[in-house]
């Protein structure tokens, strides 16, 4: 597996993965983190460093006519395209930046960041 930007061999060490996901956040308790269910996920690329991954995310957002919002996981979020608020307890698209290591078939996820969330009507296809 190689970095999509520079071609560097990523091996089993830390790598950044840009994902196009469909998610629903199920809020079971008011003060607890939600259960996040992923319906579909497409890997957009593997990257050797956060800078390369963020550059790729920026290109994706530009093509989608969107901007990064770096949202948390909240019951109400703002769409990265239309800026309107929407409930995350409905299926919606998310651009995710994950840091992971280990074998690609069973990676250890170190960190997940959400670059942008998109409401149901602004479902970007890039």
Image (cartoon, helix red, strand yellow):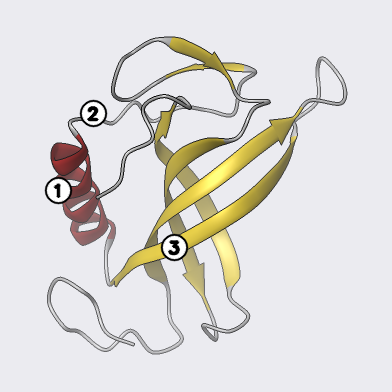
Give the left or right position of residue 30, taking residue 124 as reference: right
Q: How many marks?
A: 3
Q: Are marks 3 and 1 in contact (CB under 8 Å)?
A: no
Q: Residues within 10 Å of mark 3 (few under 14, many from 20)?
A: few
Residue at point 87%, 21% (across, down)? 29
Q: Which mark is residue 42?
A: 3
Image point (14%, 71%), residue name? 5
Which mark is first along the chain, 2 or 3?
Answer: 3
Measured in 3D between alpha carbons, the distance from the residue under mark 3 to the one under mark 2, in whole angstroms, is 20 Å
Residue positioned 12% across, 76% down in the render = 6
- What whole-number distance in Å separates the C-alpha atoms at marks 3 and 1? 16 Å
Question: Is residue 58 depicted above or below 11 in this figure?
Answer: above
Structural distance between the alpha carbons of marks 1 and 2: 10 Å
Mark 2 lies on a secondary structure that is loop
Disc 2 marks which residue?
67
**The residue positioned farthest toward the right in the image shown:** 29
For this orientation, the residue located farthest to the front is: 121
**Residue 59 disc label:** 1
Confirm or deny contact between disc 1 and disc 2 (CB under 8 A). no
Q: Earlier in the sequence, mark 3 or mark 1?
A: 3
- In the displayed orientation, state which residue is furthest to the top: 84
Which quadrant of the figure has residue 13? bottom left
Q: Give the number of the mark in front: 3 or 1.
A: 3
Give the x, y percent position of residue 35: 77, 39
Question: Which residue is located at x 34 percent, y 87 percent?
Answer: 1
Mark 3: which secondary structure? strand
Mark 2 Cα shell of 10 Å, populated few (<14), some (14-19), many (≥20): some
Residue 26 tag number: none
Residue 47 sits in quarter: bottom left
Of the numbered discs 1 and 2, the one sitting upstream in the chain is: 1
């Amino acid at each position: 597996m190689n970095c999509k930007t520079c071609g560097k061999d990523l091996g089993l060490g830390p790598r950044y993965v840009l994902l196009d996901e469909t998610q629903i956040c199920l809020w079971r308790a008011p003060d607890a983190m939600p259960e996040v269910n992923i319906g579909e996920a497409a890997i957009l690329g593997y990257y050797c460093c956060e800078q390369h991954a963020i550059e790729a995310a920026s290109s994706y957002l530009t093509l989608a006519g969107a901007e990064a919002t770096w949202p948390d996981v909240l019951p109400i979020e703002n769409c990265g395209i239309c800026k309107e608020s929407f409930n995350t307890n409905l299926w919606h698209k998310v651009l995710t930046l994950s840091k992971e290591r280990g074998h690609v078939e069973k990676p250890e996820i170190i960190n997940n960041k959400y670059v942008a969330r998109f409401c149901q009507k602004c479902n970007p296809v890039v």
